[in-house]
Amino acid sequence: MALRFEVLGRFNRARAAQLTLPHFACQTPLFMPVGTQGTIKGLTTDQLEEIGCQIILGNTYHLALRPTSELIDELGGLHKFMNWPRALLTDSGGFQMVSLLHLADITEKGVTFQSPVDGKPMLLTPEESIQIQNRIGADIIMALDDVVRTTITGPRIEEAMYRTLRWVDRCIAAHKRPHEQNLFGIVQGGLDPVLRDICVRGLVDRNLPGYAIGGLAGGEDKDSFWRVVAQCTAALPEDKPRYVMGVGYPLDIVVCSALGADMYDCVYPTRTARFGTALVPEGVLKLKHNAMVNDTRPIDPTCACMVCKNYTRAYIHCLVTKDAMGSQLLSYHNLYYMLQLSRNLHSSIVEGRFPEFVCDFLQKMFPKGDVPEWVCNAMDVAGIDISSCCSS
């Protein structure tokens, strides 16, 4: 095991911790920007350090395709290749195989998919996924799991859950760098509490360095979403990090942190930036709208980022969707917002003011008191009184 996880503060289920990895000591709760091919689009690694990014997620599938894991290994690993001194996490590659390519076929052996290069069938096995990730050299690597969207029902969910447990054993056996890289297992089981419980217990029995909750953020209703997170976080070990995969909306991160999750990743902050949308405490600000033409205010008057200090809404309105500078500035701001949210979650838990932070967050996002019912239900389970933020 190549990590140390020390809880520094708690409020009921929520916890703030220090996650010490080979390349960086991270503060949780934390958000990981997605750097598909060793880069966050539009930002340099110096800028990412500047805004307090602790860990970047790299996509194994894309990196293995180009520039190839062999070349990355030959050049000293992904940290050196992309000039990033802090922590890295790589996914297993399986999700991209399923989400990007229509002709993917999952069998006990692995994921067979159509090569985007020449159209020939290719096979990704648990062993090869780990081999690729060992070469890339991230601090945290993910086991290959059988990914099924939560909107699917029936026997396929159970099949995928049990296969995920069988595959994690193959991943453990294939892992050649356990003292330098931490292998996380992924809890599957769809929206079925019984299957989720079986998967959690199976993974915990294998005593992995950390655990992810997978298969969410795929179109399921929010009430089902938070209940799966609550169930899994309650059953996963207290002394290991818990990672909710693919979650990136600020509201979801606050709710999941209240329920005891520690780590998140999503393309949302940078992708929405490329469409001209900024993240603000009230929700989102659409810079493409004509109302921004003469607006001389910063994106967010309360934000301390370089963009909000130096540029007006009117200026960014001129750039969005027309000039690369627009998406770069908005990506910078949006990631600053997410990383500041992470820091605020951490400090509010450590300083014993987490309920106040949650209420303040909700009051800004829902000034009329119309907090969604699913959020109210989740906060009730988390033991946080938000009655002052709600109209009813």
Image: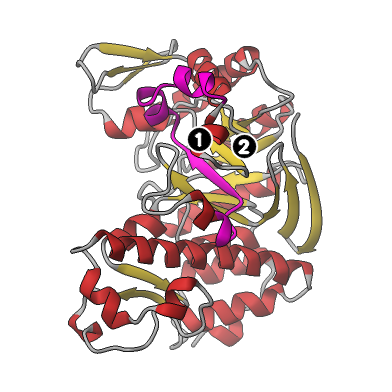
Q: Is residue 202 above or below residue 4?
A: above
Colouring rule applied to residues: secondary structure
Q: Tell me, yes or no, if residue 68 can be seen here.
A: yes
Q: Where does the magenta region start and end?
A: 49-76
Pinpoint residue 154: horizontal percent, then vertical percent: 38, 32
Q: Is residue 310 above or below residue 189?
A: below
Dot 1: element = loop
User: Hey, what amino acid is under mark 2?
Assistant: Asp
Name the residue at 61% across, 53% down: 230
User: Hey, what amino acid is under mark 1?
Assistant: Gly
Marks 2/1: CA–CA distance: 8 Å
Name the residue at 45% across, 26% down: 146
- Name the image quarter holding the N terminus: top right
Q: Is residue 127 above or below residue 372?
A: above
Pinpoint residue 137: horizontal percent, then vertical percent: 58, 27
Pinpoint residue 237: horizontal percent, then vertical percent: 75, 41
Q: Tell me, yes or no, if residue 214 can be seen here.
A: no
Name the residue at 45% across, 61% down: 249
Q: Which mark is residue 197?
A: 2
Q: Which mark is residue 189?
A: 1
Q: Quadrant of residue 4?
A: top right
Label 2 close to label 1 by CB (< 8 Å): yes
Q: Residues within 10 Å of mark 1 (few under 14, many from 20)?
A: many
Image side of residue 294 versus residue 347, left or right: left
Q: Residues within 10 Å of mark 2 (few under 14, many from 20)?
A: some
Image side of residue 312 versus residue 264, left or right: left
Image side of residue 80 versus residue 106, left or right: right
Instruction: Answer whether residue 71 is magenta in the image.
Output: yes
